[in-house]
Image (cartoon, rainbow, N blue to C red):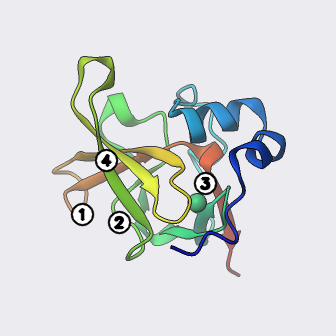
Amino acid sequence: MDNKNIPTEEELKNKLDKEQYRVLREKGTEAPFSGKYLNEKRSGTYTCVVCDNPLFPSTAKFDSSISGLAGWPSFDQALPGAIKFQKDLSYNMERTEVLCAKCNSHLGHVFDDESAKTGKHYCLNSICLNLKEEK
Ligand SMILES: [Zn+2]
């Protein structure tokens, strides 16, 4: 793997604010309805805030109809190869964690959702993402 653009853990501690570090590197979750991209409608590509890896197209973003997931930005599809998955057994639940494929930062979780176009519902933390806007 090409690591030259991936900051070290020490550099990340300086680069990210405390809350970002907690979510991205310690697998935390931002408070529901607090994220800046929850109701974002602009077009573009959502990239990883740590390494700029393009992750999700704005066309995959949708409004959650599952109330338990409605507090975070929802997507039904990631860009090819952008993310990877890991089983997460914390909090006595079996969930699938979503990680940036390039820098291993925690982004959120993916759930099965029949109301989503692809049947998949990516529930992500806004503070893990950057929207690169397209005009
Ligand atoms: Zn990344």
Comes first in the chain, label 3 or label 2: 3
Q: Name the residue under label 1.
A: 117
Comes first in the chain, label 1 or label 3: 3
Question: Could you tell me which residue is drawn at 74 percent across and 46 percent down?
Answer: 12
Q: Which is closer to the viewer, label 3 or label 2?
A: 2
* Callout 1: SS: loop
Q: Circles 3 and 2: CB distance less than 8 Å? A: no
- Observer-nearest of 125 and 3: 3
- Left or right? Give the position of 93 relative to 132: left
CA gap, disc 2 to disc 4?
17 Å
- Observer-nearest of 63 and 10: 10
CA gap, disc 3 to disc 2?
16 Å
* Callout 2: SS: loop
Q: In this view, does 76 lie above or below 16?
A: below
Q: Name the residue under label 2.
A: 77
Marking on residue 40: 3
Task: Give the residue type that dot 4 points to.
Answer: Gln
Residue 80 placement: quadrant: bottom left
